């Protein structure tokens, strides 16, 4: 009996006539891509195609076709904070944002400091998620900052890195031991760099805007002091250090110098730190309250240079969903964080439209380079045989960010009401449609098996 395959699971899908950008292979050309049985079948940019007898066809003319985005830093909140987000809602938000792989931070309740919790998250992701979820394990037991978590058990259960994100590893001796382990295991230590004494009581960037608003600032030095410490520890241990959400020009300089000296340090930057300044806080907008805080235009310029030079490897969302109550408090009390998965591309495309970043570099920082960080040659690529993780977006489509339409439970975005240019239309994870914009139609076509030139 022949049954119609559900729309979600096309056996063969031909993505026709799109602008294919795959930095892992140096591809940047108009072409066709065939997805077959959940894997990339072939990619053609010279007009030579070998079509299956029957396949669904997506007309991708005018659209960019690239590897599914890889987010190495987000918060899915489950277990423990299901009122903010769950794996089901967070992965749907990821898919809507074009992400097919997300690495979730361990500041859950219980935190991911045991193999059992890591396994639990993986099984939840398997049953309820619509994209790949790779958990990050804690550096310290209970994220308490005093005793090293069981790295051996966590590695066995498949965590891809260790971090106490949300908090720094304040104890230098603990950080040193964590880096020693990373040298032997190859799994990076991701540090949220913040000197808690320097940042104490701060709610936004330290500077003239904070003064004007009468708010206590978080100085750039609070981040840079910790970046400098971590670099010294990575240098002396030979460990693998990754700096989370770099936000200041000074941090970019420190990382650049360290890399030049051969220290094993990688770094990420968020879409909001690349596109928004501290001025967003004016009016005491709690949706612009984030840690590290939004900085200055000079910092943004330095972060963009860092991306272009390769000093910063990846763009990571630091998606941090919160409830309306968490954000409705006054500015001092409100939670830190931005719900970022669904606006990432639209926000970042502004840099491309303004000529500040080229499209290939942007896509590289969302696909190939974060996959390199994960040492996963099967991710962030459209190479034949790789899992069919594909994102298709319209670089020119304009849309207004409306948190009420978010798949995420976190409606906390400073971009609410903003006009964005660049919209994800389809996200394919392992050959299945994880997200499809209503405007997109797939049609089934039958071909006699043949080659076309
Ligand atoms: Zn953080």
Image (spheres, rainbow, N blue to C red):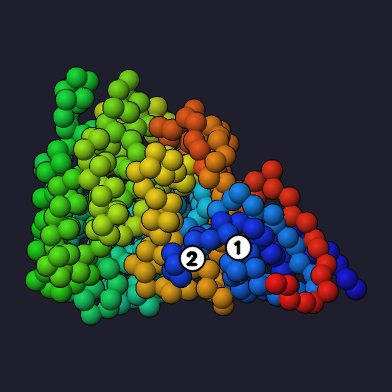
Q: Which residue is at the far front? A: 453
Residue name at image x 39 percent, y 50 percent: 358
Quadrant occupied by the N terminus = bottom right
Image disc number at residue 27: 2
Image coordinates for residue 401, horizontal then vertical, percent: 51, 34
Provide the residue designation for mark 1.
31
Image coordinates for residue 128, horizontal then vertical, percent: 58, 59
Image coordinates for residue 258, horizontal then vertical, percent: 14, 62
Within 10 Å of disc 2 (Cα), the crowding (few <14, some 14-19, many 20+) is some
CB under 8 Å between callouts 1 and 2? yes
Residue name at image x 57 percent, y 46 percent: 394
Asked if 103 appears above or below 400 in the picture, the reply is below
Report the side of 89 relative to 244 (left or right): right
Instruction: Give me the C-alpha separation between circle 1 and circle 2.
Output: 10 Å
Report the side of 9 relative to 435 (left or right): right
Asked if 360 appears above or below 201 in the picture, the reply is below
Depth check, front residue: 117 or 315: 315
Depth check, front residue: 346 or 135: 346
The kind of secondary structure element at disc 2 is strand
Report the side of 296 relative to 315 (left or right): left
Quadrant occupied by the C terminus = bottom right
Mark 1 C-beta to ligand 1 under 8 Å: no
Residue 330 sits in which quadrant? top left
Mark 2 C-beta to ligand 1 under 8 Å: no
Image disc number at residue 135: none
The kind of secondary structure element at disc 1 is strand
Q: Is residue 362 visible?
A: yes
Residue 129 sits in which quadrant? bottom right
Residue name at image x 56 percent, y 71 percent: 387
Depth check, front residue: 394 or 266: 394
Residue name at image x 15 percent, y 70 percent: 262
Asked if 246 appears above or below 179 in the picture, the reply is above
């Amino acid at each position: 009996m022949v049954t119609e395959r559900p729309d979600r699971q096309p056996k063969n899908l031909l993505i026709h006539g799109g602008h294919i950008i795959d930095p892992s292979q140096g591809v940047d050309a108009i072409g066709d891509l065939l997805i077959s049985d959940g894997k990339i079948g072939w990619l053609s940019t010279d007009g030579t195609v070998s079509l299956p007898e029957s396949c669904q066809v997506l007309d991708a003319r005018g659209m960019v076709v690239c590897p599914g985005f890889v987010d190495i830093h987000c918060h899915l909140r489950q277990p423990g904070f299901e009122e903010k987000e769950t794996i089901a809602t967070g992965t749907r938000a990821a898919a809507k944002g074009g992400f097919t792989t997300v690495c979730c931070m361990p500041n859950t309740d219980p935190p991911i400091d045991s193999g059992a919790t890591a396994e639990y998250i993986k099984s939840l992701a398997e049953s309820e998620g619509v994209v790949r979820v790779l958990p990050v394990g804690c550096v310290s037991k209970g994220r308490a900052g005093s005793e090293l978590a069981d790295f051996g058990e966590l590695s066995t259960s498949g965590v891809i890195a260790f971090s106490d994100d949300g908090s720094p590893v304040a104890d230098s001796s603990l950080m040193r031991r964590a880096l020693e382990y990373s040298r032997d295991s190859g799994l990076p230590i991701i540090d949220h760099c913040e000197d808690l004494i320097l940042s104490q009581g701060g709610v936004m960037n330290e500077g003239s805007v904070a003064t004007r608003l009468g708010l206590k600032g978080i100085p750039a030095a609070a981040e840079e002091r910790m970046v400098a410490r971590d670099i010294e520890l990575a240098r002396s241990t030979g460990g693998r250090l990754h700096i989370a959400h770099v936000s200041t020009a000074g941090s970019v300089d420190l990382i650049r110098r360290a890399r030049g000296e051969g220290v094993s340090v990688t770094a990420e930057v968020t879409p909001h730190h690349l596109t928004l300044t501290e001025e967003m806080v004016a009016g005491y907008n709690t949706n612009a309250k984030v840690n590290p805080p939004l900085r200055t235009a000079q910092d943004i310029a330095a972060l963009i240079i860092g991306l272009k030079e390769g000093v910063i490897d990846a763009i990571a969302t630091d998606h941090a969903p919160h409830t309306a109550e968490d954000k409705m408090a006054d500015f001092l009390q409100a939670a830190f964080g931005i719900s970022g998965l669904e606006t990432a591309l639209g926000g970042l495309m502004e840099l491309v439209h303004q000529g500040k970043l080229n499209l290939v570099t942007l896509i590289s920082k969302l696909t190939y380079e974060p996959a390199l960080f994960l040492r996963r040659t099967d991710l962030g690529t459209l190479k034949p045989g790789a899992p069919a993780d594909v994102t298709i977006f319209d670089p020119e489509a304009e849309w207004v960010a409306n948190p009420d339409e978010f798949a995420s439970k976190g409606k906390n975005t400073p971009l609410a009401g903003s006009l964005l240019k660049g919209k994800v239309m389809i996200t394919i994870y392992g050959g299945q449609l994880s997200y499809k914009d209503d405007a997109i139609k797939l049609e089934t076509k039958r071909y006699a098996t043949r080659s076309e030139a």
